[in-house]
Image: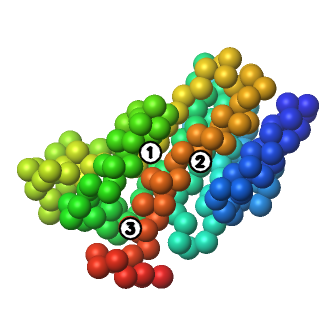
Amino acid sequence: MQEHAALIAFADALLAEMNKHDVIETASGKASLLRIYRDTRFSKEKSPYQTRWGIFFRRAEKFRRGSYYLHIEPGNSFAEGGFWGPEPHDLKRIRDEFAYDAQPFRKITSAKAFRETFGTLQGEQVKTAPKNFSKGDPAIDLIRHKQFLLVRNFSDKEVLSGNFLKEANATFKKMRPFLDYMSEVLTTDANGVSIL
């Protein structure tokens, strides 16, 4: 399939660019592609293929947490990165850090380049305060999160432009302060001592 070969070449090129500013565990562009076949066993819709391409890159080594995802679909393309489903102990560690001092994180998410690219932090949240956290905590807006995601949408015109590889890479590069902050939190205890 010609489109598949072109996507592998794109993913290989994107991986090479990303490895210039991060260390990616994913071995190749081909290995980064999510399966295109749909699981139709329990669906009324029996089309065998997805209507999108997905590219997923995992950061390498124990001190680099988080991952990158690129979704390509007509009318619904986006770059996303962060933490989709933190383990319960990781989620508690993040929330504890926000309760202790959310200012370093707020500085990252209020930076002009961050806001222009991603807007605000995305992801599922609990409706009220999680267990053992106060509704009146100044960081409750962050503590309520169960997911910590950054999202940038792309128009079809942007995806089809000759500049898309550069834009996708630049978007992922702008996620680094967020990912590096979260990595530091998740690899240290409340006193800042490495737990790995």
Look at the numbered disc 1 and give the secondary structure of its residue. strand
Q: Residues within 10 Å of mark 2 (few under 14, many from 20)?
A: some
Q: Residues within 10 Å of mark 1 (few under 14, many from 20)?
A: many
Q: Is residue 120 left or right of residue 11?
A: left
Q: CA distance from mark 2 to mark 1?
A: 15 Å
User: Please, which residue is most extreme toward the right here?
Assistant: 2
The N terminus lies in which quarter of the figure? top right
Would you call the spot at circle 3 few (<14 residues within 10 Å), some (14-19), or many (20 or more)? many
Q: If you read the primary sequence from the N terminus, does the residue marked by circle 2 or circle 1 appear first?
A: 1
Secondary element type, mark 2: helix
Q: Amino acid at mark 1?
A: Leu
Determine whether, in the image, residue 72 is placed left or right of residue 85. Answer: right
Which numbered tag is attached to residue 173?
2
Residue 149's tag is 1
Report the colour scheme.
rainbow
Task: Tell me the tag on residue 185.
Answer: 3
Residue 39 percent location from the top left of the image: 65, 40
**Which tag, 3 or 1, sits closer to the chain's start?**
1
Label 3 vs 2, first from the N-terminus: 2
